[in-house]
Amino acid sequence: MSEKRAKFTAMEHGTAEDWSIVAESNINEASELPNKIIDHLMMLGNDYGGFAVDRLTHSIQTATRAYHDGRDEEYVVCALLHDIGDNLAPSNHADFAATLLQPFVSEKNYWIVKHHGIFQGYYFFSLFRT
């Protein structure tokens, strides 16, 4: 079965039927988001970034620590996904992860994920002062 597709080639020429096809496709894509996130998280399993453990192990360790600290489910998910952007956006991975999570988490957890690189930097920023 072939996927239905809109027929317009310029947005201003889209019909109601075209836009309903696009909307339906977006809904279907959104339902696959959890699987896509897990697939991307698994890609971190072979990426060490110079650290002693791969990024997937680090992410699982972080989430496990949050869980054992009694944090709520949303916080634990944020801990698990905080570095998910390391492969695609190494220069702004915190922004990448925060943007991915923003529609689903509280403003507080969004802020924590978005700024976690600054807290991490507490341990190494001083090494680069001239």
Image (cartoon, rainbow, N blue to C red):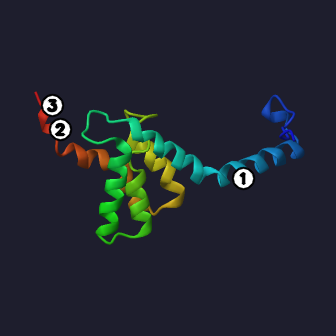
State which quarter of the image contains the N terminus: top right
Nearer to us in this view, 1 or 24:
1
**Is the residue under label 2 in contact with that under label 3 (CB below 8 Å)?**
yes
Mark 2: amino acid: Phe
Q: Is residue 9 visible?
A: yes
Q: Quadrant of the C terminus?
A: top left
Alpha carbons under labels 2 and 1: distance apart: 43 Å
Q: In the image, 50: left or right of 16?
A: left
Residue on which the image places disc 3: 128
**Amino acid on which the number 1 mark rests in the picture:** Ile
List the residue tagged with mark 1.
27
Whether tag 3 and tag 1 are in contact, CB under 8 A, the answer is: no
Residue 6 placed where, x, y %? Answer: 84, 37
Few, some or many residues within 10 Å of mark 3 (<14, 14–19, 20+)? few
Q: Disc 3 and disc 1: Cα gap in Å?
A: 46 Å
Q: Which residue matches tag 2? A: 125
Q: Secondary structure at mark 2?
A: helix
Q: Residue at x 47, y 46 (%)?
A: 41
- Residue at 36% across / 58% down in the picture? 63
Q: Is residue 15 left or right of residue 40?
A: right
Residue 24 placement (x, y as % from top left): 78, 50
Viewer-proximal residue among 49 and 129: 49
Whether residue 115 is visible? no
Q: Residue at x 43, y 59 (%)?
A: 77
> The residue tagged with tag 1: helix, strand or loop?
helix
Q: Residue at x 85, y 32 (%)?
A: 8
Which element type, helix, strand or loop, lies under badge 3? helix
